[in-house]
Amino acid sequence: MFKRRVFDALAGHKTVDAAFDDLGAKLEDLEKRCKAFTKITSTYLKNLKGFQDSAMSAAGNMKGYYEEQQSEPMFKLLDKLHMFSKDSCEKKYPLLQKTVDEQVSAALNKLHEKLAYVKGRMKLRNDARINFDHYNGKMSGLRKEREKIIANGQLAGWKNKDKFERNEKKYQAARDQYERTNAAVIEEMKELYETRFQYINAMCSGFIKMQMYYFAAYGKACSSYIGPLKQVVAGTTQSTISSGTTRSRDSKGDNGSPNSSPTAAATALSSSPPPSSSTNGTMQKSIGDSREKKATTAEMPPAPTRSRRKKANKKASQPAMPSAPPPPTPPKSRSRSPQPISRQQQPNGPASTWKNQPITPGGPSAPPSAPTQTNNVFDDFEF
């Protein structure tokens, strides 16, 4: 058979069946796709395992920042997240891999088995074809030689007469074997190709369900952390604002300027040296001289200059313009001292209407101010 295969490859004389060749090309493409999908599934599971390992490592790293202060609410949240990632990696992933093996890989293996069986049958068909082509080639040469012998009238003395009859029987057997095998294999190939979707559908649906069920459960578990995370972030933000306000008030006085407290003023005043008696006398004398000089300067009008006299003469020669009446004086309102607001007179509006309203000592206090609104990225986040 090996010699016949070599002869078949070198001679190039082959029996062609279009239906067999067409189905063979389709099944070959199907087999390539199945092998590629097997590699894709393996890579997918490997990358998913890497994703879970990275999530567990990230949760452990973030948890480490709070090891020295485990009373922080964020530490408790990260501790739960780390345990969830560890559980997903050590328990959920093996279940996922088992599901893939039972559904996706099982369907793939069945299709591979069918393809392998049909490929084996196709090989038997090709062997039958090679055998048939071998004897067909022999008989073609013997027929041409026999025709020449018959044309020359020498058939009775033809030395290859027994060889012709012997190879003719082998040729007929090889032809029958090839035709039967070829027809049976084509039917098997056609049946496999037409029923391929029962394996492909099981394979695809198993892979899709594996993804959807796993990530739906994973997303549901992850979404349970969004609410607590928003509360922790909001609480951390409010505590940061409160501590910052307290520090700013401690660093400033009542009027908002640093070192303006009464204690600081008293300390500065007590630390300055008292003035001497000679210094007091000198200062009082200089103050009296300056006041007397200012009073004398205010009583003496400035000396008229040439330009001032010209302006005065020009103004006297012009007719006088009627002066505008003075604006009416608004009536004076009686000022009342602010009266305390009783419980019945207190406004029922929002907290902003209570501003600048006096409160009776010992009476009801103003409502607490609304918390500061922060631009939190988690406020608009929805899973």
Image (tube, grey):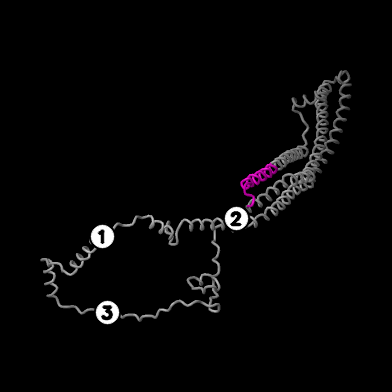
Q: Is residue 336 left or right of residue 57?
A: left
Please say whether residue 75 is one of the residues in the magenta stretch.
no
Relative to 37, is 340 above or below?
Answer: below
Lower position in the chain sequence, tag 1 or tag 2: 2
Residue found farthest to the front: 277
Eye-nearest disc, 1 or 3: 1
In this figure, which residue is indicated by the disc labeled 3?
326
* Residue at horizontal 89 percent and vertical 21 percent from the top: 162
- Left or right: 223, with 178 as reference point: left
User: Observer-nearest residue: 229 or 142?
Assistant: 229
Compute the Cα span from label 1 to label 3: 46 Å
Q: CA distance from mark 1 to mark 2?
A: 65 Å
* Residue 50 within the magenta-colored segment of the rendering: yes
Residue at image location 41% in from the left, 56% down from the top: 267
**Foreground residue among 192 and 177:** 192
Label 3's element?
loop
Give coordinates of residue 227: x percent, y percent. 65, 57
The answer to whether one can see residue 194 in this image is no
Q: Amino acid at mark 2?
A: Val
* Residue carrying label 1: 283
Q: Quadrant of residue 373?
A: bottom right
**Residue 83 appears left or right of 347:** right
Which quadrant holds the N terminus? top right
Task: Name the residue tied to disc 2.
Answer: 233
Q: Check contact, mark 1 vs mark 3: CB within 8 A.
A: no
Magenta residues, start to end: 47-71
